Image (spheres, helix red, strand yellow):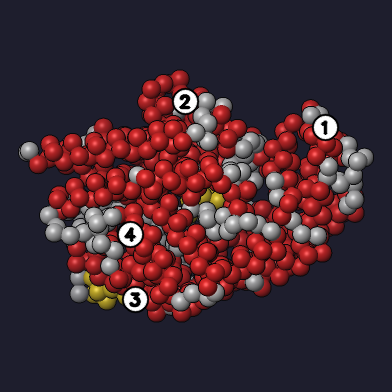
Amino acid sequence: MPEMTDVAWNLDDLFSGVDDPAIEQSLDDALDKAQNFAESYRGRIDSDDLTADTLLSAIRELEEISSMQAKVGCYAALVFSADMSKPEHGALMQHVQERSTEVALELLFFELELMSAKPEVIDALVKDESLTDYAHFIYAARLFRDYKLPEAEERILEEKANTGGRAFERLFEESVSDIEFAMTIDGEEQVLTEPEVLALLKEPDRDLRKAAAASLTDGLTRNGRLLTFIFNTLVYDKAVNDRLRGYESPEQARNLSNELDGETVETVISTCVEGYPLVAQYYRIKRDILGYDKLYHYDRYAPLFESKEECSYDQAREVVLESFGSFSDEIRDAANEFFEKNWIDASPRQGKRGGAFCMYVTPDLHPYILMSYLNRKDDITTLAHELGHGVHASLSRGQSLFNFSSALPVAELASTFGEMLVFENLVSKSDLDEKLALYAEKIEGVFATIFRQAAMYRFEQALHRNRREFGELTGDQIGELWQDNIQAMFGDSVELGEEHRNWWMYVNHFIGSPFYVYAYSFGELLVMALYSMYRREKAAFVPKYIELLKTGGSCSPAELLGKVGIDIRDPEFWQGGMEVVKGLVADFEELHRLWKAK
């Protein structure tokens, strides 16, 4: 097994280093092309004389410029995420943002003119065969036509964002990354990163979990004043932007971006909230297995049985590839490329961004995965999740740039499906105790994705509503909103102690991607329903699924899922996904009965 320090990505396909002169050259070239683009097309898009040839030519040139920017922007984001402690990484990130803004200002007119063009002109042009592949891109851009400002005002907002919202997002990322979480483990004083201290919440030793929870709270609380100010600033910044643009609710911009109507989103979230009793049902069984009188926040992810067994990175690789291969050779081979070609950064280190992600670059390049692999069994699931994203990106590479990335609600499709494949593979090889533990881990993962994300969405709604109505909120006020909404998910089955009240402070989705979280609930319930379809149809389902992934972002979520007979506006479809979750809990209940009868 290689040392974890060796499991780092190779970014040479992008640039050779932060001082590579090709970075500046790419930025210069993108700006030159953007200026030429503006000279060529300004005033020609919002015109009754617009032709299909002109629009097609403009879109393809725009894709070329966007590809150049994506390559530089992704490189800067990747090196920054891998080690935020190096000043040169932050400096590159900021420099690229500033240079990218110059390009964005030159290109801004195109989006505005495309939105302003008469519907009858656009409808007629899209019928032209040459524009068929870009129909979705064109109509998706026009969804925002009622919420755009005049070009002069848009230019001001874009340029000021680098010293406003984007600057505060970076401040948040760097601040959380720099927090040191002190712990005494086996008599030794240690300083841990956020991913490392969160990992301890899954340790079998209850005292260690409790100490880790206290350390997490202490680290966040020491930085609470700054983090609370950042939250308030960005929530207010969004309120100002929403008011200027005329959005009717804090969620509306996200819904438009996701190509979903508010009613569909509310249907999904309501289905999740109505399923909260499943959470209490599960945790009462878990409490019985653990033999505790009461469960607290630091017990939520406690393993059912004490085990020192670790899972090496190589073992995880083998499990994931075997699981993916049981479904499709094409899926397995696409995943294997990430290992063979060093597209994964899995080494834990101080200064590394917490969490995990798969970053798409462009169709002619490959995606990259970041995570912190800690040799824990649940790291297999994280690896499978991110490789699912990676496979999705790889299979979408036949699309053009503007049709490459899926809308958020279906972006979690392949990642969550990959988790299910790994789960069923592991269960098939396990004894009763192992099955019980695997079901517990799976159910807790499903709960974290469906119910916790729905609860966090409700928290976000309350946060934005209260900030707009009452002004700047204190950390205690935000903590109360957090505690109330997350506690609702557990009912009386788990008590979230006072320590948990500040744990909203490290959730980066609230900062950089407001209302992003419901996409996880959407995606998980969707996959539950699709996996049920796979169990019924078996091999006949595989080509349908692969075709869904290859479609990328070339159509809306409703259109994409309509290809396999799914109506996302139908509450019964979502209830069908919830029935699969109920089945998992029922299976766990039966395993618990058999275990007690041993």
Q: Nearer the viewer, mark 1 or mark 4?
A: 4
Residue placed under numbered mark 4 in the picture: 487
- Label 1 sits on a secondary structure element that is helix
Residue 57 placement, left or right of 314: right
- Label 3 sits on a secondary structure element that is helix
Which comes sooner in the sequence, label 1 or label 4? 1
Residue placed under numbered mark 1 in the picture: 124
Which comes sooner in the sequence, label 2 or label 1? 1
Q: Residues within 10 Å of mark 3 (few under 14, many from 20)?
A: some
Q: Is residue 356 above or below residue 415?
A: below
Distance Cα–Cα, label 4 vs label 3:
21 Å
Q: Identify the residue shown where x is 27% and y is 76%.
A: 189
Q: Nearer the viewer, mark 4 or mark 3?
A: 4
Residue placed under numbered mark 2 in the picture: 542
* Percent coordinates x, y for residue 345 in the rendering: 47, 55
Outermost right residue: 49
Which comes sooner in the sequence, label 3 or label 2? 3
Residue placed under numbered mark 3 in the picture: 218
Which comes sooner in the sequence, label 3 or label 1? 1
Tell me the amino acid under the disc marked 1: Ala
Q: Identify the residue shown where x is 45% and y is 28%.
A: 329
Q: Identify the residue shown where x is 86% and y is 46%.
A: 45
- Label 4 sits on a secondary structure element that is helix
Q: From the viewer's side, name the closer residue of 122 and 110.
A: 122
